[in-house]
Amino acid sequence: MNLNLKGETTMIKSNLKELLHSRDISIREFSRRIGYRYESVRQLYQGNNDRIPVPLVERICKELNCDVGDLFTYIPS
């Protein structure tokens, strides 16, 4: 849960689970492909991140040939 400048609750949702599922790629296989720690990829997959490293986002987008907007959805409350 995050707060915006007005003090309202907002959420950034990861779409990694859906993106990998649609390509039939496991989290473990994907973390190997992008050369990133399994635990970090798993946390993003499950939406358990408070902070997301930019290099991780870059590697995901490059491997999946997608845009940051495909990887995340902004859900205002």
Image (cartoon, rainbow, N blue to C red):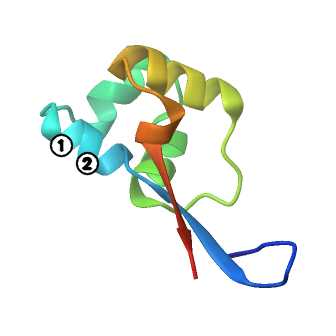
Q: Is residue 24 left or right of residue 8?
A: left
Element at label 1: helix
- The quadrant the N terminus occupies is bottom right
Residue that sits furthest to the right in the current view: 5
Q: Quadrant of the C terminus?
A: bottom right
Residue type at the position of mark 2: Glu
- Residue occupying the point 85% across, 80% down: 6
In the foreground, 20 or 29: 20
Looking at the rendered structure, the kind of residue marked 1 is His
Q: Please tell me which residue is depicted at 46% across the width and 23% down the height of the picture.
A: 61
Across and down, in percent, residue 9 comes to 68, 82
Where 76 falls versus 56 (above or below)?
below
- Could you tell whether 66 is left or right of 51 in the image? left
In which quarter of the view is residue 24 placed?
top left
Query: Looking at the image, is 31 positioned above or below residue 12?
Result: above
Residue at position x 31%, y 38% in the image? 27
Mark 2: give few (<14), some (14-19) or many (20+) Cα within 10 Å.
Answer: few
Query: Which x, y percent locates residue 56?
Result: 59, 29
- What residue is shown at x 38% (from left), y 50% (from top)? 15
Q: Say which residue label 2 marks.
A: 18
In terms of depth relative to the viewer, which is nearer, 68 or 46? Answer: 68
Q: Position of residue 51 (x, y in %)?
A: 71, 52
Question: What's the CA distance linking mark 1 and mark 2?
Answer: 5 Å
Tag 1 near tag 2, CB within 8 Å: yes
Q: Give the camera-side residue of 15 and 55.
A: 15
Can you say whether 37 is above or below 69 in the image?
A: above
Residue named by callout 1: 21
